[in-house]
Image: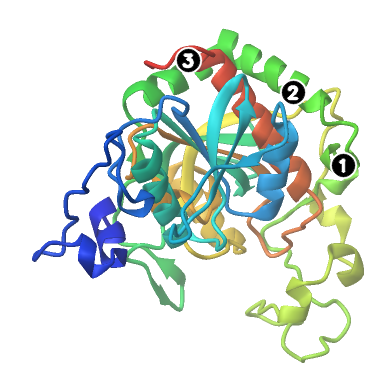
């Protein structure tokens, strides 16, 4: 993983570098602020100690819906590479990053520039949606709409190669959360704080129920298919690529864009979800596997779960994990990381993640506590 300097310095204009390519000191105006926002090495802005990072528009929309008031654009210079917004979230003024492009690189650059501009954040939440492990080797089953909070991040495609048996990783270990965040995560695992987090997040979600796309889908829309049952054309494939009888289970692009209903995926091959009254939406703490690619292979998914204790997959966490020791990933499970990958749950999963983030801040970083 590149360091912050390796990510940022190459993008500085020549006038702001020294002979070694490092940042020049920035001259200050009479009020002791840097003369250029894009060049500043800012001291902390007292308004902001919490940053929230989203990568997708639907993730930002869910966050905006959960704010106490509509988001506002923060002042920026014309040459600033990123624009940030702000709002009141869980009683705290937060600065929000939503880069124009998705992926690890732009997410990392945006966080780096955010902290150059507003100072080092004491809490950075990467918020949004993820794929989840339906049956972890240990712990409770995971269902769509559940939320996973990071205890560690595994850069699982780093040093990987492909061979006939699939994705082969060199021996790597997840990078664990440290300091205050680790202590908070231990508290979340206790019965008392687990209940409090669930109750506060449930109350926050109730406030979004007037928006239909933030309501939970019926239980029968949560389908976890057996790993051996793939999302393929059951009738002949129009491109003659994927076929239910083919030995390699290759999936054509058309099938990837087509719903299980239209492909006639057999629901009897799927695990039924218990009624919400018996099994409400859960909150889990565990390892995120992160890479700049989409996980849609059940065998690779389960292999990483068994070897590294992975609970969820995303595409941004590994890009920002090393930039600040106080980073936590909070994401809602919208699919199971297999070939079926429905999109129906994305809005609700994003809303649940936002509401769990409200509970996380409310319980562990209360309003007025700027020294956590």
Q: Earlier in the sequence, mark 2 or mark 1?
A: 2
Residue 11 x %, y % = 31, 65
For the N terminus, the quadrant is bottom left
Residue 187 marker: 3
**Residue at the image point whose x is 77% and y is 26% from the top:** 280
Determine crowd level at label 1: few under 14, some 14-19, many 20+ residues with C-alpha closer than 10 A. Answer: some
Which one is nearer the viewer's eye here, 336 or 1? 1
Residue contact between numbered discs 3 and 1, judged by CB atoms under 8 Å = no
For the C terminus, the quadrant is top left
Residue 276 x %, y % = 84, 28
Q: Is residue 122 above or below residue 33?
A: above
Q: In the image, is 120 to the left or to the right of 328?
A: left
Q: Quadrant of residue 282?
A: top right
Compute the Cα span from label 3 to label 2: 21 Å
Which one is nearer the viewer's eye here, 272 or 9? 9
Circle 1: element type: loop
Residue positioned most to the left: 19
Residue contact between numbered discs 2 and 1, judged by CB atoms under 8 Å = no
Residue 204 marker: 2
Write down the residue under mark 1.
217
């Amino acid at each position: 993983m590149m360091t912050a300097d390796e990510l940022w310095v190459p993008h500085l204009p020549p006038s702001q570098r020294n002979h070694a390519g490092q940042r020049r000191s920035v001259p200050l105006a009479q009020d002791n602020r840097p003369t250029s926002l894009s060049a500043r090495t800012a001291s902390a802005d007292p308004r902001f100690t919490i940053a929230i990072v989203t990568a997708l528009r639907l993730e930002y929309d869910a966050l905006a819906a959960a704010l106490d008031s509509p988001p506002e654009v923060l002042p920026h210079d014309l040459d600033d590479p990123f624009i940030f917004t702000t709002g009141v979230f869980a009683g705290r003024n937060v600065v929000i990053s939503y880069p124009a492009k998705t992926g690890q690189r732009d997410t990392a650059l945006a966080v780096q520039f955010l902290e150059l501009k507003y100072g080092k954040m004491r809490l950075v939440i990467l918020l949004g949606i993820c794929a989840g492990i339906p049956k972890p080797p240990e712990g409770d089953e995971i269902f769509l709409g559940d939320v996973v909070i990071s205890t560690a991040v595994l850069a699982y495609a780093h040093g990987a190669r492909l061979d006939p048996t699939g994705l082969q990783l060199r021996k790597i270990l997840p990078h664990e959360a440290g300091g205050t965040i680790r202590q908070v995560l231990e508290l979340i695992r206790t019965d008392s704080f687990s209940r409090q987090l669930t109750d506060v997040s449930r109350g926050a979600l109730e406030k979004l129920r007037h928006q239909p796309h933030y309501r939970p889908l019926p239980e029968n829309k949560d389908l976890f298919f057996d790993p051996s049952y793939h999302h393929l054309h059951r009738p002949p494939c129009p491109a003659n690529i994927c076929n239910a009888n083919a030995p390699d289970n290759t999936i054509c692009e058309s099938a990837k864009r087509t719903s299980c209903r239209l492909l006639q995926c057999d629901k009897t091959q799927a695990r039924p979800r218990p009624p919400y009254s018996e099994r409400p939406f859960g909150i889990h703490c565990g390892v995120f596997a992160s890479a700049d690619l989409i996980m849609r292979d059940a065998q690779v998914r389960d292999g990483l779960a068994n070897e590294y204790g992975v609970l969820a997959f995303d595409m941004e966490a590994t890009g920002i994990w090393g930039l600040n020791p106080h980073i936590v990933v909070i994401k809602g499970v919208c699919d199971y990381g297999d070939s079926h990958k429905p999109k129906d749950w994305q809005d609700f999963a994003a809303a649940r993640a936002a509401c769990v983030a409200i509970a996380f801040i409310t319980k562990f970083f209360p309003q007025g506590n700027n020294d956590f």
